[in-house]
Image: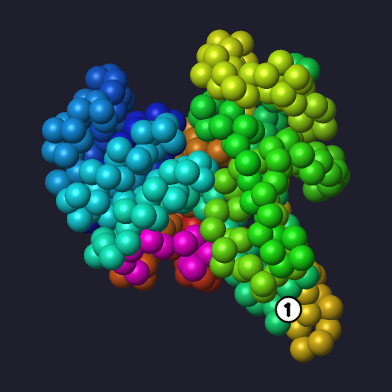
């Protein structure tokens, strides 16, 4: 299978790195606006200079691939998905943006190809785990999903350094989210619903952000009492973000805030991903709690040093590509929670990163 990856930044290049060792993948083409993308050591990968906004350039890449993964900024995904739909090529992305997902879903109606947005970490793997645990109970009172992509250490007031897309980070802090309350779908306010939790003796705060719940509210409406997703940070981060986004009204100037973050907030490769899912419900009339909790670090793969957020995000989508290559995904729009956890963990990179 030949796989196209659009966007050769940290995550896009990591996807290509993981695909290097996958038998189902025979070739990778990385499309990026930059002409100096470095892929040395990756025998399956080659690069092409690509302007996504140039329809002819995008079409030329898409039509040569069996599947396309968008690792580009979320605001380019609609254009990429449209190009795939017009040529009957299967499409995958990493977006947390709800509007983009709804657009992809409309494109996928009656399609013979597979359209599966929201692959990756959260949304992505978190929904596969959450959906599987919730489905394992007869009746579910509560399903909590929490993910934190965090620096191992930080000395600034935000207690945070950048480790992934700044535009995506700001977007999920600004957009409305979704949850189930009393079994019914509700809208959640960003940066609201603050709580504290402790994992391995470290205290975190968690608060509402958009996108991480993916399509689970639709799937489990009327079946789960309380279902929600929250982002984890070190205590104090949320208050500073609320000051900037709401008190200073920068939520209406996301591009400006993104520029400020990119200029003044350091990037780090020394990070950790904290992954937490807890469900409570009944099995044969008995109240039980089941959980899936991991702390995941970076690793060296194909002689490339990968951060925790790079590895966990790329592993999520590469696992999905392996299932796609094996004919285990259907046509049209595919939800993350439709993937059995056992199948996900049986894949090469799903098992290696998220398994025991």
Q: Quadrant of the C terminus?
A: bottom right
Which residue is painted at 37% across and 50% down in the image? Answer: 104
Q: Any magenta on residue 39?
A: no
Tell which of 207 and 2 is nearer to you: 207
The colouring scheme, among rainbow, by chain, secondary structure or one colour, is rainbow
Q: Please tell me which residue lies in front, 334 or 205.
A: 334
The residue at which mark 1 appears reads as 139
Q: Residue at x 50, y 38 (%)?
A: 310
Coordinates of residue 191 in the picture (x, y in percent): 73, 36
Quarter residue 284 falls in = bottom right
Q: Is residue 333 magenta?
A: yes
Q: Residue at x 57, y 46 (%)?
A: 211
Please name whichever residue, 152 or 66, is drawn nearer the observer in this view of the structure.
66
The answer to whether residue 95 of the structure is visible from this angle is: yes
Based on the displayed image, in which of its 4 quarters is residue 252 positioned? Answer: top right
Compared across the picture, whether 223 is left or right of 199 comes to left
Tell me residue 10's x, y (percent). 44, 31
Magenta stretch bounds: 330-339
Q: Which residue is at the front of the view, 251 or 156?
A: 251
Q: From this view, report whether residue 145 is shown above or below residue 158.
A: below
Residue 129: give x, y in percent of width and height.
60, 62
Secondary structure beneath disc 1? strand
Compared to residue 7, the image places residue 15 above or below, namely below
In the picture shown, does residue 198 fall above or below 135? above
Q: Position of residue 77 (x, y in %)?
A: 37, 39
Q: Quadrant of the N terminus?
A: bottom left
- Residue at image coords 80%, 48%: 199
Q: Quadrant of residue 41?
A: top left
């Amino acid at each position: 299978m030949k796989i196209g990856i659009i966007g050769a930044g940290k995550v896009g290049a990591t996807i290509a790195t993981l695909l290097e060792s996958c038998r189902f993948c025979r070739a990778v083409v990385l499309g990026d606006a930059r002409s100096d993308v470095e892929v040395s050591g990756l025998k399956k990968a080659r690069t092409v200079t690509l302007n996504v906004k140039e329809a002819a350039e995008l079409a030329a890449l898409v039509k040569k691939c069996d599947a396309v993964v968008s690792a580009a900024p979320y605001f380019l995904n609609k254009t990429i998905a449209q190009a795939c739909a017009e040529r009957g090529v299967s499409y995958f992305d990493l977006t947390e943006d709800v509007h983009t997902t709804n657009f992809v879903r409309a494109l996928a109606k009656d399609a013979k190809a597979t359209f599966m947005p929201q692959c990756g970490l959260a949304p992505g793997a978190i929904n596969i785990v959450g959906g599987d645990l919730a489905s394992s109970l007869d009746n579910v009172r509560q399903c909590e999903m929490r993910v934190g992509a965090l620096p191992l250490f930080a000395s600034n007031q935000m207690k945070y350094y950048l480790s992934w897309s700044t535009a995506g980070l700001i977007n999920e802090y600004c957009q409305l989210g979704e949850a189930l309350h009393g079994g019914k779908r509700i809208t959640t306010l960003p940066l609201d619903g603050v709580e504290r939790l402790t994992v391995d003796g470290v205290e975190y705060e968690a608060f509402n952000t958009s996108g991480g719940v993916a399509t689970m509210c639709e799937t489990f409406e009327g079946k789960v009492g309380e279902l929600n997703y929250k982002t984890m940070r070190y205590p104090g981060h949320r208050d500073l973000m609320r000051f900037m986004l709401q008190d200073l009204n920068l939520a209406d100037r996301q591009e400006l805030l993104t520029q400020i973050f990119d200029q003044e907030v350091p990037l780090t490769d020394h990070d950790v991903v904290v992954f937490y899912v807890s469900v409570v419900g009944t099995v044969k009339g008995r109240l039980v709690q089941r959980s899936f909790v991991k702390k995941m670090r970076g690793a060296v793969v194909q002689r490339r040093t990968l951060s925790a957020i790079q590895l966990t995000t790329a592993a999520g989508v590469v696992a999905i590509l392996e299932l796609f290559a094996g004919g285990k995904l259907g046509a049209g729009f595919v939800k993350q929670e439709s993937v059995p956890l056992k199948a996900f963990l049986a894949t090469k990179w799903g098992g290696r990163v998220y398994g025991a």
